[in-house]
Image (cartoon, rainbow, N blue to C red):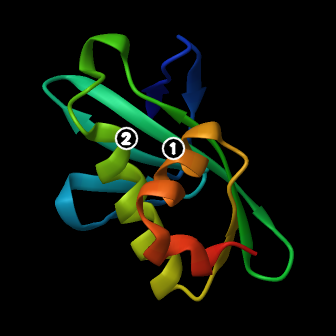
Amino acid sequence: MAVSRPEGITVQHSEPDDHHLPNGIRLDANAGEYLLELDGMTAVLRFRELPNDVVDLYSTFVPPEARGRGMAGRLVGAALDHLRAEGKRIVPTCSYLGTYLDRHPEARDLVA
């Protein structure tokens, strides 16, 4: 399956490892991405697995024409809920994650 990325790069996945989460969020574990599609646009939260059940959330992208519609917040909220359920901790290297955690102090306990 070919998946188009926001940067215009197409990545081939021979065996996708997709999981559907609540609120229309999709996890592509092979690509290291949480995705939210809305009106033909895709918001992406990129991550990489670190040792000791820690996940680095390093990039959030929302298409410019979709910004201000809450996509990033929905995406990050669902990802954090999923990671909490999996017993994972996070390293929030993406700048948006810092903003999100300031607005949602209840999620700060996930920070490794």
Residue 28 in sight from this viewpoint: no
Q: Is residue 26 left or right of residue 14?
A: left
Q: Quadrant of residue 87?
A: bottom right
- Residue drawn at (36%, 12%) of the image: 64
Q: Nearer the viewer, mark 1 or mark 2?
A: 2
**Amino acid type shown at disc 2:** Ala
Q: Residue at x 46, y 86 (%)?
A: 85
| Disc 1 to disc 2: CB gap under 8 Å | yes
Front in this rendered view, residue 13 or 62: 62
Quadrant including the N terminus: top left
Q: Position of residue 79 (x, y in %)?
A: 44, 62
Q: How much space separates mark 1 and mark 2, taking CA atoms?
A: 8 Å
* Local SS, label 2: helix
In this image, 31 relative to 62: left or right? right
- For label 1, count other residues whose C-alpha is less than 10 Å away and answer few (under 14), some (14-19) or many (20+): many
**SS of the residue under disc 1:** strand
**Which residue is located at x 83 percent, y 82 percent?**
52
Q: Quadrant of the C terminus?
A: bottom right
The residue indicated by pointer 1 is 45
Q: Please state which amino acid type lies under the numbered disc 1.
A: Leu
In the drawing, what numbered circle is on residue 72? 2
Asked whether residue 51 is in view, the answer is yes
Q: Residue at x 42, y 56 (%)?
A: 103
| Image position, residue 95 (x, y; %) | 63, 38
Q: Position of residue 107 (x, y in %)?
A: 49, 73
